[in-house]
Image (cartoon, rainbow, N blue to C red):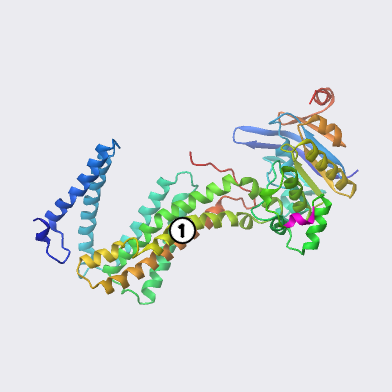
Amino acid sequence: MILAASGTSGYVGWLGLLASLSLVGLAVAISLWQQLGLEGSLLWASVRAIVQLLAVGALLAVVLSPHVPLLLSWLWVGFMVLFAAETIRRRAPEIPGARRLALTSLGLATALTLALLFGLGIFPVDARTVVPLAGMVVGNSLTATVVAARRVVGELSDKRAEVEARLALGHSSHDAARPYVRDALRTAMITQIESTKAVGLVFLPGAMTGLILAGEKPIDAVLVQAAVMFLILGAVATTATTMALTLARRLFTADHRLVRLARRA
Amino acid sequence: MTAVFEFEHVRVRFDEHEALRGIGLAIEDRRVTVLTGPSGSGKTTLLRLCNRLEVPTSGRVTFRGTDLSSLDPLGLRKRVGMVFQRPALFAGTVRDNLAAALPAEDSIYEEVLARVGLQSASLDNLGDTLSGGEAQRACLARTLLTDPEVLLMDEPTSSLDERATRILEELATDLVRQGLTVVWVSHDLAQVRRIAEETVVLIDGSIVTGEPASRYLARDS
């Protein structure tokens, strides 16, 4: 038995990793059976994930080793924010100034949520916490930021007549955009809210599962997971709101006119 | 007659397309001025310059002698109201829509609804339950709540039936009798004949006068 070699602590090992590839094989078999044409993507995604995780693991080993300054962890966080902003720009090319807006939103959310988390003493400030927690913030905020940006542009474009009717009544651009920005924000945040509501009932989240597999007591794993979930909730709300408000502002001129908007094809 | 708006050498360009080509025009106070012409002739662009939903690429527009670019656009838009081509009611009831223009007591809303020929009972109606004509009159009521001196009407009857069209036309002419100025965009020449006190014919971004204007206006609508 390959898995018997992994023992009870959740340690997987190289053989265990190879064995787990049988699940990728299952996904590939389903793709072949249903003629989805996704075999290449599944294999490429799996190989890429292994390479990326190994690279991250090696880098983490360096960052976590004693005598390495904490500054290196913060540089890593900065790199994550930059990379996420570039990802958002590529995923939402129709958003004017997407990279800069994403940098602002993700930078602010990361700074604010980590300041609260470390400032309130929920987690200690060290290399073991800074990079993984910032990773949680940036990774989970990415989709919400794209959704918020796309919805703001979509709402203001689809409801241009209503927005201009509000402007024509003498509303400021901020007031005229508010109902549509609000709708965009609700859409961007609802997935995370639903996910928070379903936690424990429908699924066991990654951090908690990982800790339990690593041999931590379930109650300790739960406490860490709860703090991480609230961190993600706060981060998603902050990034989506910053993105929506700054983008909406950019879509109006200084004299309160709605600019011409290009919709996503 | 004094001019409410004066256009001096006004050009508007959208990317490669020149929508208005050197407009010179004075719009008189307390009159119904109709801007007419074929589709794409620049009528709506000209109208939207009056409340700064568009700005000239060159030239200038004045409102009662003051350059529009030096006026606060929010204050200007309360003085120069606008009704759009399709009724643009916001989500919610008629009361919600009126409150978006002016938070006030129901008695104020009932008064303005009466001015446009709508029942006060419609205050609680959802905007999307109104007929096209009722919705457009509710939009007019909403605009009147900012107490404008000028009403810009951008083909407001294009989606309405004959009866609703006539009601809105009568309302506009009544408002002029009450002291407002109406600038109305229409490509319906029968309507131009019914309501226009002043007529401006635009073709391909320019104002035409004399024989070409007469020829255009003499066409069957």
Where is residue A238? Give x, y as percent. 46, 63
- Image quadrant of residue B14? top right
Q: Please give the residue where the numbered disc 1 appears in the rendered image.
A: A190
Q: Quadrant of the N terminus of chain A?
A: bottom left
Is B106 in the magenta? no
Is B120 in the magenta? yes
Please determine whether, in this image, residue B165 is positioned above or below residue A17.
above
Residue drawn at 24 percent across, 47 percent down: A46
- Judged from the image, the secondary structure of the residue bearing numbered disc 1 is helix
For the residue pair B6 and A91, the one nearer the viewer reads as A91
Question: Callout 1: residue from which chain?
Answer: A
Type of residue at label 1? Ile
Where is residue B156? Give x, y as percent. 75, 41
Residue drawn at 18 percent across, 49 percent down: A21
Where is residue A145? Give x, y as percent. 44, 55
Q: Left or right: where does residue A18 sit relative to residue A208? A: left
Q: Is residue A236 visible?
A: yes
The magenta stretch is B119-123
